[in-house]
Amino acid sequence: MIQTIRDNAAQGRFELQVGDATAFARYRREPGQLVITYVYAPPVLRGTGAADRLMAGVAAQARSGGDRIVPLCGYARAWLQGHPAHRDLLA
């Protein structure tokens, strides 16, 4: 099943819907940057790779928009540092 990341600009977050649960990454946009302030996966999605898939989608969004990522959230920072293919996105 292919899951897509939704940019919910009204709430300032990227969302990944899995069944009835939603993982999300709160963000704010700054010139040339995507500031990730918080990544959340509900308990039912923890350990399923949902947050990993969400961050992969966030990275893809940043790359396609020509943005660098400022990971204020510890999970987002650890994810970017742990994925060499996306480290170039770190601001």
Image (tube, helix red, strand yellow):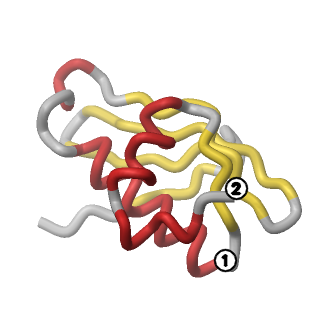
Q: CA distance from mark 1 to mark 2?
A: 10 Å
Q: Quadrant of residue 10?
A: top right
Q: Amino acid at mark 1?
A: Gly
The quarter of the rendered structure image containing the C terminus is: bottom right
Q: Which residue is mark 2?
A: 34
Instruction: Say which of 89 and 42 sits in front.
Output: 89
The quarter of the rendered structure image containing the N terminus is: bottom left
Residue 38, horizontal then vertical, whole percent: 55, 30
Q: Are marks 1 and 2 in contact (CB under 8 Å)?
A: yes
* Label 1 or label 2, whichever comes before in sequence order: 2
Q: Is residue 8 left or right of residue 5?
A: right
Q: Which residue is mark 1?
A: 65
Q: Quadrant of residue 50?
A: top left
Residue in the picture at 42% in, 29% down: 40
Residue 42, horizontal then vertical, whole percent: 30, 23
SS for dot 1: helix
Q: Is residue 27 left or right of residue 58?
A: right
Residue 21, horizontal then vertical, whole percent: 27, 33
Q: Is residue 23 left or right of residue 31?
A: left
Q: Amino acid at mark 2?
A: Leu
Residue in the picture at 42% in, 51% down: 81
